Each structure stands twice: as C-alpha cells, then as structure tokens.
C-alpha cells in the first residue's frame, strides 16, 4: 500500500496522541512526545489539528509531524518504521514540495530521530546539520529526593500563578491564563501536571509542566523556567527534582528533556537535578 499524507482534524487528534504514547519507550531516541502536542494545545484544538501531519500505510500511522512554529517540523516514527525507505522517501518529497502543504518554501528545520533514514535522505537532498541540542534523561526506578522547597500542584483556580512565572522566565512568552485553560482541556493533559516552586516568603520562583506518556514510559518536562528575579539560588534544580518526582508518581519510567547545547546553564541545571546527558542531536536545516 502507498504512503498517505494526512491531516487528522480535531476529531483525529486523540488517535495521534495515542500512537505517540505507544511509541515512547526507554532506550528509544528522543523524538516528538505526546507532551509536545500537549504544550502546543495552549493555542487550542483547531490550531493543534492544523499543525499536525501524519504519514500512514494501509490505515496505520507510521510517522507524525508537528509544525511547531514557522518553518519547524518535529517528527516521530513508529519503532519499526524509522528505517522504512518508502516512508522516508515520501516524507522527504512532501517536505520539499510546498504545494503538498507541509513546509513552505524558504528556510526550514526538521527535527527527527538521529537513527531515522529520513536524516540520511535529507542530507542527500542538501539539508545541513543545524546547531546541537542536548537530550537528558533521569531514571525513575528509585524514589526521588525532596526538592527542598514548597511545591504547588497548580489547578484551574491557580493557573494565573503558573502563567505569571512562565512569562517572567521567558521574555517572549505569550502564555496567558486562557492558554493554560486551553492546554488543560486537551487529552494529553490528562497525564500532566503543572508545578510551581515557592521560596521561604511564599513567592512563586520557578515552574514546570510535566507530561506522562503512560505507566512504564518516559515522561517529558516541557517547559521549565525560573523567574528572572530569583535566578542563581538553586530553584531551577529544585523544580527539576520536583518534576522528576511528579512523573514517578504518574508511573513514568524515566524523565526526559532536551535543551540547546549552547544553553550551558540549562544543561547544568538538569544535570544537578539528577539527569544524565545523552549524545547530542541536531536538526536538519535548509537555507532559503
């Protein structure tokens, strides 16, 4: 059967989330996680559906792509499809030809598992390796230590606290209360938690959202931030440890996160929170 490029629509997003959950397992390369769709859901179900692409054969989804901002396609593959030549060649054709509705002409980046055949074919087509990212993983077999600060699990009535820390952590953040509620209404948030760390005075100093992919599977931290007025005091490490503990309570086998290698402070924070660096990964980049 031929490979079919599709858009799931709002009604099909649940199936996409389910297959992404199924594809996560320890030892697998870092790739698109259901939590990535969950975080994108802050823009609403319709926007999320419009940003998702699927590649299927005989009705079975083999690859999922998320258009995560202008010119960035993030990919995940079924474990047995990462080296599928027919799939990889069709995918490269689809991202190369703008009329197919995946990527527009001009500059673009594609995030794909490093072992996937599509990486090789994109190189042959003239795409270059972009800046390195550092994935990190923490095993959750053993209990997680106390983070040393008060941790709040944020519900709807306290969403404003979570969003305020996000905006104070990232200068370009547009995370509003309405967007928190849109995110929390999505199916991926069923297995997610928003955590806020408080200092001794009760001020909210750091926050993170964690996403489980189900019991026995890796969970994701996305995003984590420390309030700009409270940096350099260990709160990044504290909220990272709290994130690991929350994922363990949700049944996750490990916690994963990925950050630009150039962000040495973030890498150091995750390492201090018990995460182990994995080999660097690189997106594929196409110039205009």
Image (tube, rainbow, N blue to C red):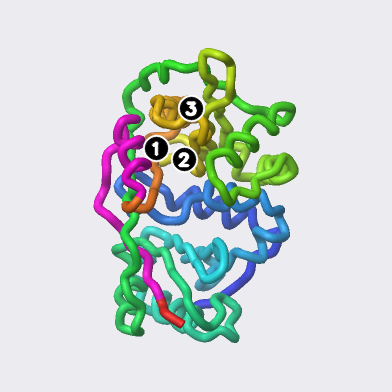
Provide the residue designation for mark 2. Answer: 221
Locate residue 185, reporting x and y percent.
71, 42
Cα–Cα gap, marks 1 and 2: 7 Å
Locate residue 259, reporting x and y percent.
39, 49
Crowding around mark 3 (Cα neighbors within 10 Å: few <14, some 14 to 19, many 20+) is many
What kind of element bears circle 2?
strand
* Among numbered discs 1 and 2, the one appearing first in the sequence: 2
Is residue 121 rendered magenta in the image? no
What kind of element bears circle 3?
helix
Q: Residue at x 52, y 13 (%)?
A: 200
Q: Residue at x 56, y 75 (%)?
A: 102
* Among numbered discs 3 and 2, the one appearing first in the sequence: 2
Provide the residue designation for mark 1. Answer: 255
Provide the residue designation for mark 3. Answer: 246
Q: Which residue is drawn at 48% across and 27% down?
A: 246
* Among numbered discs 1 and 3, the one appearing first in the sequence: 3
Cα–Cα gap, marks 1 and 3: 10 Å
Locate residue 240, reporting x and y percent.
42, 31
Q: In the image, which is nearer the foreground, mark 1 or mark 2?
A: 2
Cα–Cα gap, marks 3 and 2: 10 Å
- Asked whether, in this view, residue 173 is left or right of residue 243, the answer is right
The answer to whether mark 1 and mark 2 are in CB contact below 8 A is: yes
The image quarter containing residue 16 is bottom right
Instruction: Give, as a single range, the part of the protein colored magenta.
Output: 263-285
Locate residue 140, reporting x and y percent.
35, 30
Residue 168 lies, with reference to residue 125, above or below; the image says: above
Residue 2 seen: no
What kind of element bears circle 1?
strand
Is 72 or 186 nearer to us in this picture? 72
The image quarter containing residue 277 is top left
Residue 69 seen: yes
């Amino acid at each position: 059967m031929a490979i079919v490029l599709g858009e799931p629509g709002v009604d099909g997003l649940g199936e996409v989330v389910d297959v992404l959950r199924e594809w996560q397992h320890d030892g697998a390369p870092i790739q698109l996680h259901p939590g990535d769709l969950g975080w994108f859901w802050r823009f609403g179900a319709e926007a999320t559906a419009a940003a998702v692409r699927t590649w299927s054969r005989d009705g079975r989804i083999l690859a999922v792509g998320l258009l995560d901002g202008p010119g960035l396609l993030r990919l995940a593959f079924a474990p047995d499809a990462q080296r599928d030549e027919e799939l990889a060649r069709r995918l490269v054709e689809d991202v190369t030809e703008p009329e197919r509705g995946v990527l527009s002409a001009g500059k673009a980046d594609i995030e794909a598992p490093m072992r996937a055949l599509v990486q090789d074919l994109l190189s042959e087509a003239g795409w270059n390796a972009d800046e390195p990212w550092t994935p990190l993983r923490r095993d959750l077999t053993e209990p997680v230590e106390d983070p040393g600060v008060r941790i709040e699990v944020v519900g709807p009535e306290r969403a404003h606290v979570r969003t305020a820390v996000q905006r104070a952590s990232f200068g370009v953040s547009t995370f509003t209360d309405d967007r928190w509620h849109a995110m929390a209404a999505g199916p991926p948030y069923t297995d997610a938690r928003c955590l806020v760390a408080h200092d001794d005075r009760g001020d909210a100093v750091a926050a993170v959202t964690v996403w489980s992919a189900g019991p026995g599977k890796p969970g994701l931290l996305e995003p984590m931030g420390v309030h700009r007025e409270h940096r350099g005091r260990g709160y990044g490490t504290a909220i990272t440890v709290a994130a690991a503990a929350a994922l363990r309570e949700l049944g996750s086998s490990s916690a994963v996160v990925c950050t630009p290698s150039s962000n040495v402070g973030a890498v150091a924070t995750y390492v201090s929170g018990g995460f182990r660096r994995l080999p660097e990964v690189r997106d594929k980049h196409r110039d205009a």
